[in-house]
Image: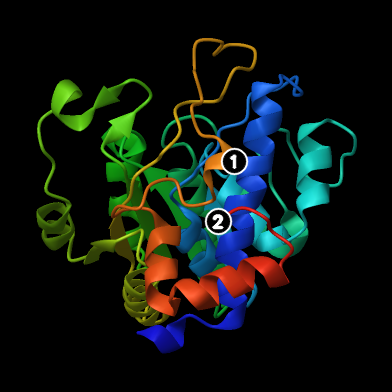
Amino acid sequence: MLNLYTENVINKMILIRYWQHLINEKLKEKKFKIPIHLSFGTEAIATCVSDIIDKGNKLLLTHRNISYNLAIENNFKKILDQYLLKNNDLMGSMNLANINKNLIYSSSVLGNNLPVAAGVAMSLKIKKSNNFVLVIAGDGAIEEGALWESLLFIKSHNLKVIIILENNNHSMSSTIQERRCNIDFKKICDGLEIQYFKNKGYDYSKVKTSLDSAIESAENQQPCLVEYEIKNFNQHAGPTPGWPEDPMKIDINEGLILKDVTKDPLFYLKSAIGDIAYKNKLKSLDINYE
């Protein structure tokens, strides 16, 4: 799968991680007036999704969306200035949307973007568009009734929708085991005859493989759900108004890779391209942290 790690993919994954580190350091310095939900651990999915959205398909995000905005805009200063409230080029503050690049909606209300995505997909069908809708949800949002109603609606109308479930086994301050019974999404999708895929969300090659299958399904008007197992290495929103107790222990001086263990997308990236290539890439991007 090494051939999947193109120069664009490698650059984007490394920069998304680096830029998040820079924002994280500013969070610890209390430079922001708004809460920012970082997403260390979703770089592989965000990179893969950004290439799809470039082709004119629509993306609807949840509140923890910084990786996707960085990947799609690919302009750190523009995103940073938005968080610093210096401009209004992008819609929103914490919940950014970038309509000019097909990132059309973002919501901090659990599951709210799912029915909106269904409506957008219906609009595309009425217009006889060949594009599809991709919507991101977390393992907390899928506990809302909006998921079940949206699944039923998109299947009943055979809408071109891909739901990406980022399952990090954690919602705010509780694990899945602490707050609810297990949910077998494959059985739910089987019951509605919706395509279901599951893979490791921290391994770009596996993310790409599953998403390619999902795209093929959506293009054939078969909505699908892709469940990715991930790990969020940060807590909620940093030491900003509303969440002062979040310690945010991640430190850029300890290197871009958070832990040399599984579930860190950059660890997988480094393993795939090799230590020497990884270090050379950091130098070419003028990044002085290993």
The front one of 252 and 161 is 252
Within the image, what quadrant is residue 223 found in? bottom left
For the C terminus, the image quarter is bottom right
Question: What's the residue type where badge 1 is placed?
Answer: Ile
The front one of 214 and 218 is 214
User: For numbered disc 1, what is the local secondary structure?
Assistant: helix
Image point 62% across, 72% down: which residue? Answer: 281
Task: Give the vertical position of 93 relative to 208 (above or below).
Answer: above
Image point 30% across, 52% down: which residue? Answer: 261
Q: Is residue 196 left or right of residue 34?
A: left
Residue 289 seen in this snapshot: yes
Specify the label residue 57 is tagged with.
none
Q: Is residue 230 left or right of residue 127?
A: left
Whether label 1 touches label 2, CB < 8 Å: no
- Give the residue pinned by disc 1: 252
Calculate the distance from the C-alpha at mark 1 to the C-alpha at mark 2.
9 Å
For the N terminus, the image quarter is bottom left
Image point 44% across, 46% down: which residue? Answer: 258
Q: Residue furthest front?
A: 276
Within the image, what quadrant is residue 197 found in? bottom left
User: For numbered disc 2, what is the local secondary structure?
Assistant: loop
Counting residues from the start of the chain, the first of labels 1 and 2 encountered is: 1
Image point 76% across, 23% down: which residue? Answer: 31
- Give the residue pinned by disc 2: 290
Residue 15 pos. (x, y %): 64, 59
Question: What's the residue type where badge 2 is placed?
Answer: Glu
Q: Residues within 10 Å of mark 1 (few under 14, many from 20)?
A: some
Residue 24 pos. (x, y %): 62, 34
Residue 271 pos. (x, y %): 37, 70
